[in-house]
Amino acid sequence: MTSGGLTGTISDTVARIRQEVCRLHEQLTRWELVTWTSGNVSARVPGADLMVIKPSGVSYDDLTPESMVVTTLDGDVVDGNHSPSSDTDAHAYVYRHLPQVNGVVHTHSPYATAWAARDEAIPCVLTAMADEFGGEIPVGPFALIGGDDIGKGIVATLEGHRSPAVLMRNHGVFTIGASAKAAVKAAVMCEDVARTVHIARTGGPLVPIEPRHIDALYERYQGVYGQR
Ligand SMILES: [Zn+2]
């Protein structure tokens, strides 16, 4: 399909989101979160029940804004010359069920996915984890690709946590954010803490952070930290 179905303001907005989503994929390779074509970023299109997602099977070097695919929140293509990512159903389910989420990222980043392979949540033993995740990074259920099973597992797990990241068992990482950039940041931070906590445990027992300290760190970071 081409852009025939999109006109006016929505067409301009979609063009902007195509650029944003394309550029954010550079971060997946920059931070070594993906191998071959295995990860993807999507963003909700503001003001429309649409999302923009990576095309299926296109290598990161070849991605362009024009090659991004626009779908409905049921995963049906409305604009684009490629098939959407095979993870489109999972992204779409998240947007349908979590209205505050405007960006979703999926990777098989190695340290985080190793925790998923063990069905083991990453315990909150670093202040940086308390800041970004507000506690442990939880594990979601095993789910086969296709249909809503992965999406259901992501939403059911994250609804009970402050974490914007979930380790889907035997699979990999899904992150959510108020923006696609925030979801990418969560994916980068998830892999970073997965690696550090793994290394820490090889040297001895992990030391937990008290829940009240996790709360204080999370509230400060989410509310105060950074440039206003
Ligand atoms: Zn995957």
Image (cartoon, helix red, strand yellow):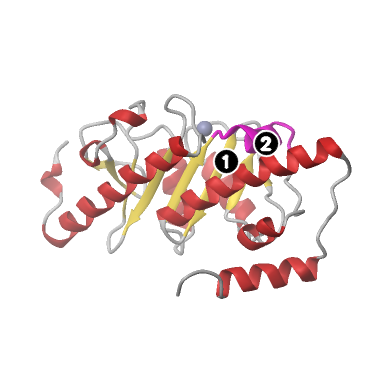
Q: Are marks 2 and 1 in contact (CB under 8 Å)?
A: yes
Q: Give the CA distance from mark 2 to mark 1.
A: 8 Å
Of the numbered discs 2 and 1, the one sitting upstream in the chain is 2
- Is residue 74 shown above or below 144? below
Q: Which residue is mark 2?
A: 116
* Residue 53 occupies quadrant: top left
23 vs 97, nearest the viewer: 23
Callout 1 amino acid: Val
User: For the point 48% across and 26% down, which residue is it?
Assistant: 35
Lateral position of residue 134 relative to residue 180, left or right: right
Where's residue 210, x and y in %?
A: 82, 65
User: For the point 42% across and 38% down, which residue is it?
Assistant: 40
Callout 2 amino acid: Ala
What secondary structure is marked by label 1? strand
What secondary structure is marked by label 2? helix
Residue 116 drawn in magenta: yes
16 vs 84, nearest the viewer: 16
Where's residue 46, x and y in %?
A: 30, 62
Q: Is residue 122 visible?
A: yes
Q: Which residues are magenta?
A: 108-119
Query: How many neighbours does mark 1 have within 10 angstroms: few (below 14), some (14-19), or many (20 or more)?
Result: many
Q: Which residue is mark 1?
A: 173
